[in-house]
Image: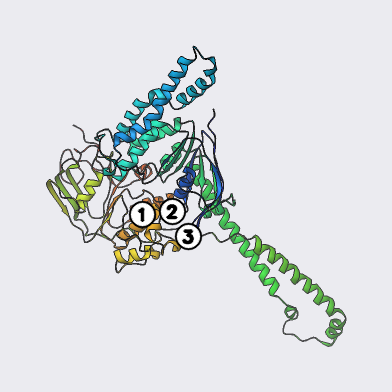
Amino acid sequence: MPIPALVAHDLIKSYDARIVLDGVDFVAAPGRRIGCVGENGVGKSTFLRLLAGVEAPDSGTITRPAEVAYLAQEPSFGDSVSVRDAIAAALDPLHRGATEVERLSAALATDPGATAAYNAALEWAQSHDVWDADRRADLALKRLGLAELDDGRGIDSLSGGQRSRLAMATIITSRPDCVLLDEPTNHLDDDAALLLEEFLLSLPGVVVITSHDRVFLDRVATDIVDLDEAGAASAGIRSRGAVRYGGNFSTYLHEKEAARRRWEQTYRDQQQELTALRRATAVGTSAIAHNRGPTDPDKFVHKFKGANVERTHARRIHSAERRLDRAERAQVRRPPAQLRLTTPLGATPEPSLPAIAIRDLQVVGRVSVPYLQVRGGERLLITGANGSGKSSLLAVIAGQVRPDRGTVDVRARRIGVLSQDSRFSDPQRTAREVFAREAVGHDELGDLGLLPPRDLNKPVAELSAGQRRRLALAIVIARQPDLLLLDEPTNHISLALASELGDAFKTAPGTILVASHDRWLRQHWTGDRLDMDHPAQQVGAESNPCQIRLRTSCKD
C-alpha cells in the first residue's frame, strides 16, 4: 500500500494571547524532504509538534501516515528506561514483521486466501528493511558515538546530546513512514551527520525537518518552507502563513534575497505614489492664482466661468482621493527591520601576550592536550568527533573543570562562556529581567539586536530553544569579555543569526575559542584550528618540531 501524504489544513495555534501559527496549509508527499526555516520564535518547533500529534491545534485538520517518528530538540523517554530498552522497542515491530511474513509464507501452502495478507506483510517488511534491522541498529549506535555505552544504563543519566543521538538511532533502526526532525544535527559530528543524510536520502516516506545546518539542508532538502510571516510577505505571496520554495537551502536563500529586494522596491514605489496623491488631495481652489486678487477682466471671467473651474478642480480632487484610497488599501506593509547583531563580540585583550597557555593537560577519560597556546586577539576553532574532548577543554579553560595533570594558564580580565545547554536559574522571570540580573550595568537587552521587542517581556520558560540561546548569547556579549569560549554557538539559532555570528568572528577584537560541528562555519573559518580527533597535535608558538598551526600537517 502506498504511503499517504502528510497534509495540514488551516492550522491555527496560540499560546495565551499570542498567535504562533495562523492558518497554515501544508502538504508533504512521500519522497519529498522538506526543510522548515524561519526566525527563532516563528513556530517551527510548534509546527512539528502539531504535525506529530504531540500537541493539538486550536483549529484546523491534519492527516498523517500510519507511522510517525518525531525527534524533539530535547527528546524524552519513559521513566526507568535503559539504552537497551529503547533499542529493543525500535526493533520489536520489525522482528514481528519478519515473523509475520514467515508465518504467512508457510500458510500459503494450505490457504490460498492468505495471498493478500502475505503480499501486504511482505511489502511492509521490504519498505522497512526488517531483515537488516539488527545490523542497522548496531551501525547507528556505532556511528552516533553510542556503542561504548553500557546498554543497561538509564537514559535519564545520559547527556542531552546522548539522548538526542539515541532517539535518532531508534528512528534509523525503525525506518517509519513519516519522520519529523527538530534540529537533528545539533549534537552530531561529521560521521553521524553523514549517517543521517544517508538514511534520509534512502527513506521512501515523508520527511520534514527544521534545521539551522545549512550544509545539511543543501544536501538533503528537496523543498524549503518558510514559516516566517515576514519571509512569506517578502516573497509577495500569502500562502496561508507559509511560503514553499522548490530546491535546497542555497536555492531558497537566493530566491529569498531577491524577493526581499522586490518587496523593498515595491514599498518605496508605493510610498512615493502615496506621497504624490496626498499632495494632490491637499491642493484646494485657493492654489489657483494664489495671493493675487482678480483684475476687472478676471472678475468677469470668474463670474461666468469660475463655477466650471471649481467643478473641474473638485472632480480632480475627488479622483485623487479615490486613487489615494485604493492605493492605501493595496499598499504592502513596510519591510520589517532584519534582526542584526549590533554589538561587537568581546573586548580588546592585552596585546602580544598569551591569553591561554596549556601544557600536558589531561582530564582522565575526557580530554588530553599536550600543548596549546593562543595569543590575545587570536581565533581558534576546535573540531572533532563527539567524545573527543572539545567541551571538556573549554570547561577546563573556563575553570569549571580541574585537570588531573598539566598546567593551564589563562590571562583574561573577563571570560565569557556560552555552554551547549542554555539554562537559567529562574525561568519564570522575563527575558529582560534575566538579562538585567545576569548582565548588571550593561546595555539594554533590546539594544543588542538578538531578541525582537515582542519577546523581551516574555518569561524565559515560554521562549523557544533558539530564543533562549539568543538570550544566553546576549548575556555573554553584554559583559564584553576579552576571552570568549563558545560551545556550539550556532545550535538552535536561526540561519540568519548563524551567518552573522560567522561574520562577527572575523572582526571581533577579543580572543575567541569556538567548539563546533557546524560544517558551514568550518568551511568559512579564517582563524587557527585545533582538531581534537588527533590529540598529539599542538597549537601555539613554541619552537617544537611537531607543532601544528593553521591547516598545517605534522609529518614524521
Residue 8 lies in what quarter of the image? Answer: top right
Residue 95 at what x, y percent from top left? 39, 25
Question: What amino acid does circle 3 point to?
Answer: Asp
Q: Residues within 10 Å of mark 2 (few under 14, many from 20)?
A: many
Residue hosting label 2: 40
Q: Quadrant of residue 326?
A: bottom right
Please tell me which of labels 2 and 1 falls first in the chain. 2
Residue occupying the point 42% across, 58% down: 340
399, above or below 98, in the image: below
The nearer-to-camera label among 3 and 1 is 3
Q: Real-space Cα distance between discs 2 and 1?
A: 10 Å
Where, quadrant-wise, is the C terminus in this rendering? top left
- Write down the residue under mark 3: 16
Q: Does 365 appear above or below 14?
A: above
Query: Could you say whether the residue bearing mark 2 is in a helix, strand or loop?
Result: loop
Question: Of the residues shown, which amino acid type is indicated by label 1?
Answer: Arg
Is any part of residue 145 visible from this angle?
no
